[in-house]
Amino acid sequence: MASRASPLCPLLFLCTLTAAWGFPFRPSLDLDVTPRITVFSNGLLGCRRFSGAALNYSTLLLEDEAGVLYIGARGAVFAVDTGDISAPGNNMTIEWEASPEQKRQCMSKGKDNQTQCYNHIRFLQRYNETHLYVCGTNAFRPLCAYIDVEHFRLSSGFEEGREKCPYDPAKGYTGLLIDGEMYTASQYEFRSSPDIRRNIPYPIVKTEEAPTRWLLEADFVGSALVRESINSSIGDDDKIYFFFTEKSQEPMPYFSQTRVARVARVCKGDWGGQRTLQRKWTSFLKARLVCSIPDYDFHLNVLHSVFVVEGRDPQSTVFYGVFGLEWKNVKASAVCRYSIMDVQKAFEGPYVENPDSPQRWAEYTGKVPEPRPGSCITNQLRARGFNSSFDLPDNVLNFARRHPLVFQQVRPLGERPLLFKRSVDYTRIAVHRVSALDGVQYDMLFIGTDEGWLHKAVEVKGQVHIIEELQLYEEPQPVDSMVISQTQRSIYVGSPSGVLQLPLSSCGRYASCFDCIFARDPFCAWDGTGCVEVASVANRSGLTQDVMNGNTGCETSAGEDMAAHRTRSVAEGDDVLLQCEQRSNLATPQWTLDGRQLEGYGLDSGYRVGTDGLLVIGARPEQSGRYRCFAVENGVRVLVASYTVWVRPDLPPLPPTNPPPVAMTTTTRSPTTMTRSPTTMTMRLPTTMATTTAATSMAPPPTSSPTEQPLPSPPSPPAPLPAGPEFQTYRNMEAMYISLVVILGGMCLVLTVVLLYMAFCVQGQRPGRKCSLQGGGARPERKRSSHMELKTISSHCNGRREDAPDGHLQIVPGEGQASPNKDSPPPAPPLPLPPPLPSSEYVNGLSATLPSVLRKMNGNSYMLLRQADPETASPLYYSFTEELNRILEKRKHNQLVTKPDESSV
Ligand SMILES: *[C@@H]1O[C@H](CO)[C@@H](O)[C@H](O)[C@H]1NC(C)=O
Ligand SMILES: *[C@@H]1O[C@H](CO)[C@@H](O)[C@H](O)[C@H]1NC(C)=O
Ligand SMILES: *[C@@H]1O[C@H](CO)[C@@H](O)[C@H](O)[C@H]1NC(C)=O
Ligand SMILES: *[C@@H]1O[C@H](CO)[C@@H](O)[C@H](O)[C@H]1NC(C)=O
């Protein structure tokens, strides 16, 4: 019976893969970029917030010259002053709620009365000089209307919105109003097929559904007009590009991947065919957008947002896409950049074989009719008498109808993501092109996350440097929309709770010349006394900036004056903390004593270094001297703090504390001993502290942060390990990897036994039934529950049939809402193939069932990986202020030595 083996193989495979993923260390993980500065919401500078009585500020329309930001929310449209969106009295409101009767009908249709039975504004664009056009979901009966801008009110009369605006406020949707023509793309109603259409003017032009479906469960994220007719030598047409994710037609490397990102386009002058493709696009073509990590063949297939950046001419248009994973419980994001020329090239290349043919996925190699199907009308076609899409011959249109997809994939510029980020889900991107002082144009990326953070980054030579990560809201909430105002030099961010205005730069945050240079913010430069906004300075000759490398220009500046100098006098044998905060996540601390660098703060050196300072353990008189703390960033060493330390030898003799870490009173020594263990030092896991404090049983155990998971079992007690400079090598990581592999191996063994037992048990008690892990490509037919369920072994084996009606062991991945949406994400792979770069934030609340144990293991292995990653904020250093304070406190009481006095000079 095959069923016995089937659950085991994938699990063993998973175990092997999990181990392989973490060991050895693979280089491409270096792509993961650490934001230089982390700013929490209480530290935002120049931030302004707007929120009315409404919720869901999801649609923004910026009219920069007029200085007005229009905001579409739930049940209201606002107009606010872009100079200060929070200014009271400067905003206007149109209340537009669904009628009570409409809400009742919505609820009777079984829709969610908390979210869906409202009028969510989804479309808000300029119609003509005097009016805006607006569409709302209107409690599942969409309506559109004109807004008279001058009086800011709805013009009389609503228009049917059924085929212009989706019914569901959360459904993917994009729309454009260009030259009085309205283009929209969505799956408007639950039962209808997704569609790209021109609604205005009449007659409507749409996508084809039979015999070939042009769109398969498409989820739209964006659209853009590219005016390719301008200066076109071939008399080309303007085109509208649509960006979406849809069900894949092509074979995927992993069976749990079922969706792909696409770009499609139609020509603006397309009016459909005469007999064939009547009122259907004759110029529709789509291509796959690839965003993958080359060394892994690891694909991010779900497109979350697109931003199109226009160049000097249409051909130099580029667009940025933010991609995520299909699996809901693993977070990772990537930003890829594409050239519109590559999209055009793909559309001119071979087609994919008609999907109804036996070779569903293959390059079409047969004869292609003339003129080329899916083309716009160009001069060449006009010369041949094809003046418009109506003139195209039937054989061409028939071919176009059956071959919407082109074979060539659109690959990102540079063949790899500009940015890859683990444990983050990016939701929106906006890009601002700016000229820096070096005359180079840089693209600044503003990327919003699902938890309300904004990453501000600059792209330099194909790499992304994240200048800062800003927490926009205390309450985590997704960034729903973003627009950038050139004139206000502000970014506006819409989210469920409101709209926020932030200046594009906060140069004042950078206190020194080096800080200003390291930031690499194209908006900021050092003027000799402060970090200033370039745009605010008329004479720029005296400004210093280095966006390209982020390290030159400050050599002569008086950095040393900035550093605090202190004197400390301590008793011999005391532990001393010399504080030195590293403000930048990219800086590493370096200490000198009387000008000599303290080499590798090893086990016996008597020193420990953390992100917040240097710990001198059991100070000895020869450790007196002048200590200086430097931050090393971008290869530059900057003085942060200096101390003169006197160790007074005139105190009650204590046993020499160096080298063997013994003596002192047991209570004070034991934590130091523990924390000196190299294994624990390399990790920032709270387990370390918990263990040590438990040993002293004096201080309360620290609360562990939700993102940090304790190790399965801390390697205890530290074996004699190579001390000294090797400390900083990866040797310790190796030990950790080995223990990790051992742990994983043990888990696998246990799982195997459990599954064997299960298989035998079911086979023994219920011949004819089988235990199988269902998931991956096989989509469960039944309605999904909102939790990961695992029918337990006992429910199989003790005959509680109602728990497992079909006798299968099922993993039913969760879905946010219980609506049976067809485009819900496919089941999260119980067998991540390859393990999707595992996430440390394991937050979707799975109960401790079998697969989640596995994933948690996965998460832990990631934790270990992350500790070793030199890119992520210096793993060898961790904060021990608290620990030290405890030691000092205790020492004070135990030994009654004179309190170390500190005096500032
Ligand atoms: C929504 O429906 C639930 C259950 O039908 C009901 O208890 C609740 O009061 C309703 N809420 C609103 C705002 O109507
Ligand atoms: C703009 O469109 C509205 C609605 O169709 C119309 O009433 C108004 O006259 C138009 N304004 C101009 C200047 O054409
Ligand atoms: C609207 O806001 C509510 C509450 O913040 C949130 O739960 C809901 O998902 C939002 N709906 C949409 C369509 O964004
Ligand atoms: C196309 O347009 C040209 C000039 O406008 C006209 O002479 C010609 O007859 C048209 N051809 C067709 C097939 O309509």
Image (cartoon, rainbow, N blue to C red):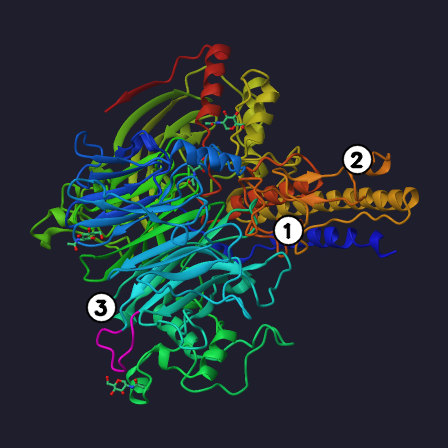
Q: On the rendered structure, is 895 left or right of 813?
A: left
- At horizontal 58% and vertical 42% (from top left) the residue drawn is 815
Residue 232 is one of the magenta-drawn residues: yes
Q: Amino acid at mark 1?
A: Pro
**Where does residue 763 sit, x and y in percent of width and height?**
89, 46
Region of the chain picked out in magenta, as a range? 229-238
**How far across and how far down the image is residue 48, in percent?**
24, 34
Check disc 3 and report the residue beneath it.
312
Residue 888 position, x and y percent, is 46, 19
* Residue 47 visible in the current orientation: no
Which residue is labeled 2 in the image? Answer: 802
Q: Whereabouts is ligand 3, in terms of quadrant?
A: top left
Q: Residues within 10 Å of mark 2 (few under 14, many from 20)?
A: few
Q: Are there few (<14), some (14-19), or many (20+) residues within 10 Å of tag 3? A: few
Helix, strand or loop status at disc 3: loop
Badge 1 residue CB within 8 Å of ligand 3: no
Q: First in sequence, mark 1 or 2: give its number.
A: 2
Is 676 left or right of 280, judged from the image as shown? right
Say the numbered circle drawn on residue 829. 1
Q: CA distance from mark 1 to mark 2?
A: 26 Å
Q: Please say if the residues under marks 2 and 3 sit with CB atoms less than 8 Å apart.
A: no
Q: How far is the residue under mark 1 from the one under mark 3?
A: 44 Å
Task: Using the rendered view, name the quadrant where residue 248 is placed.
Answer: bottom right
Q: Secondary structure at mark 2?
A: helix
Mark 3 belongs to which amino acid?
Arg
